[in-house]
Amino acid sequence: MLSLPMTRGIRGAITVDENTEAAITGAAWRLTQAMMRANQVEVEDIACIIFSVTPDLDAAFPAAGVRLAGLTTTPLFSTREIPVPGSLPRCIRALMLVTSNLRQEEIQHVYLGEAVKLRPDLNSGQDGNAERPGVGVPDYRKTILDIAPYQPGKPISELRREKGLTDIIKLASNENPLGPSPKAMAALQQYLTSLHIYPDGNAFELRRALAQRLGVDAGEIIFGSGSDEVIKMLGLTFLEPGDEVLICEPTFSEYAYAAHLMGAKLRSLPLKEHAFDLEAMLAAVNPKTKMVFICNPNNPTGAYVNKAAVDSFLARIPEHVLVVFDEAYYEYVRAADYPDTIGYVREGRNVVVLRTFSKIYGLAGLRIGYGVAPGQLAQLIQRVREPFNVNAAAQVAALAALEDEEHVIKSRELNEAGKNWLYQELAKLGLDYVPSQTNFVFIHLKQDSQVVYQRLLDRGVIARSGGVFGCPNWLRVTVGTQEENQRFIQALSEVMGR
Ligand SMILES: Cc1ncc(COP(=O)(O)O)c(C=O)c1O
């Protein structure tokens, strides 16, 4: 039974490996997220958060990290912990004051990393069940505590439930506003009577068609339940504790997931002009660097690195590093100097190219994506694949969508026209944006995007607030149909009072 809303205090602590800004701000953000999740707390429920750090952490204030990650209006405070004998090194503590329906004894305090040791009475602490008598958890892999659960764009059904709105548009997850390929839908209809049969684990038909399309051997393709799964498979195949994974940020979150899942160390560099900074990445490679992800064009910015930069990068990258190009938005790219990464696969380099049927092909709900890698790499990755990882409906629809050139062309043209129109309108509103090679635009609001995001929700428009990417003054919007784009611009100008 719920009690009346009361002010409650949630305690939390986390340790970090090193005294760096990235480690401190990242850990503070993870801790905050975990405390909120464990107690079903929304941002507006938080009265304030007080952080303290041990004296050996002076590279950054944890509050600054949380601010960057989107808690832009929550009062935050950072202070230094008084050293006491036997206290844990490199530790960040938090006290979050919230309004909550939970009773005092139901509040879940959260202790992550080595900080678990601070409260042995809470069993293992971080699962949130710890203070309930009699509930313990078996020991588990501590590396999973570094994983920040994926924060998806808000589903239409959720906004409908929350606000009772009926006329809602979702421009938050870079889906195709034209919907799936009609040919894919027709093929699926035909397939319905075969749903009792297991899928072809090797996806033979689709593999053959795609290999022909890409000019690679059939054995050089790895299918996944979304390219998300291929990213995870790369982790399972190559990463071990002690390995390092190099990325630039802000970017797509699943590279961090794969690294943390395997207990590898994630090293993150800033973007350069909104795209991956290949020169800085090269300089950061060391003998432990196992994998480098290059999101190109990058999500959430839409910017890209060109062929000359990639050629030069690959010419100098040491052989022990696997280079992963994530090209989820490949089919939308118009830049003439965009690299032909499949060519690198044909040359047998240590590269994997990731693409997906979720974007221009409009099949995000079915979950199918793929990786392309030289045969010797692809065979290794295949070993970690589950037998029927890509469902039969996805295979059938993807094959039909691949052959539906008309739908792809229509989708691309709609996107180009919509994007150019959005650019014009944003300029009229006096807003800057990053020129995009994708089906979304990253807009510099120069003010708290969480507020704008919420007010857009009130008007039935779901966009993506930049806070989740560590860019609290930015908003990402998917290019929709012309009608959707107009509705977005209308709502944005109202919200921003322009
Ligand atoms: C850069 C990037 N990579 C991969 C994905 C995941 O795609 P999939 O639906 O194939 O898992 C996305 C989805 O938004 C993305 O933006």
Image (tube, grey):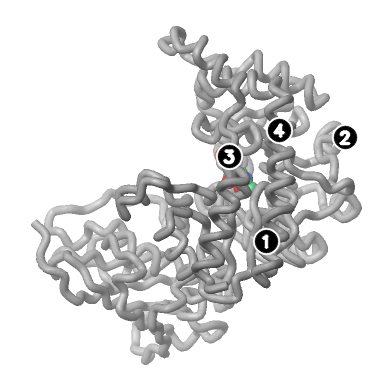
Q: Nearer the viewer, mark 1 or mark 3?
A: 1
| Residue indicated by mark 1 | 425
Q: Residues within 10 Å of mark 2 (few under 14, many from 20)?
A: few
Q: Tell me which numbered mark, 1 or 3, is placed earlier along the sequence.
A: 3
Q: Residue flagged by tag 2: what amino acid is it?
A: Glu
Q: Quadrant of ligand 1?
A: top right
Query: Considering the numbered disc 4 on the image, is that residue within a helix, a strand or a loop?
Result: helix
Q: Nearer the viewer, mark 2 or mark 1?
A: 1
Residue 444: quarter of image = bottom right
| Amino acid beneath label 1 | Glu
Q: Which residue is rendered at x = 52% and y = 16% of the image?
A: 188
Query: Which residue is the site of mark 2?
Result: 347
Question: Which of disc 1 and disc 2 is earlier in sequence?
Answer: 2
**Mark 1: which secondary structure?**
helix
Please name the residue that numbered disc 4 is placed on: 410
User: The disc labelled 3 sits on which kind of residue?
Assistant: Pro
Mark 4 is on which residue type? Lys
Secondary structure at badge 2 equals loop
Whole-angstrom CA distance, mark 4 to mark 3, is: 11 Å
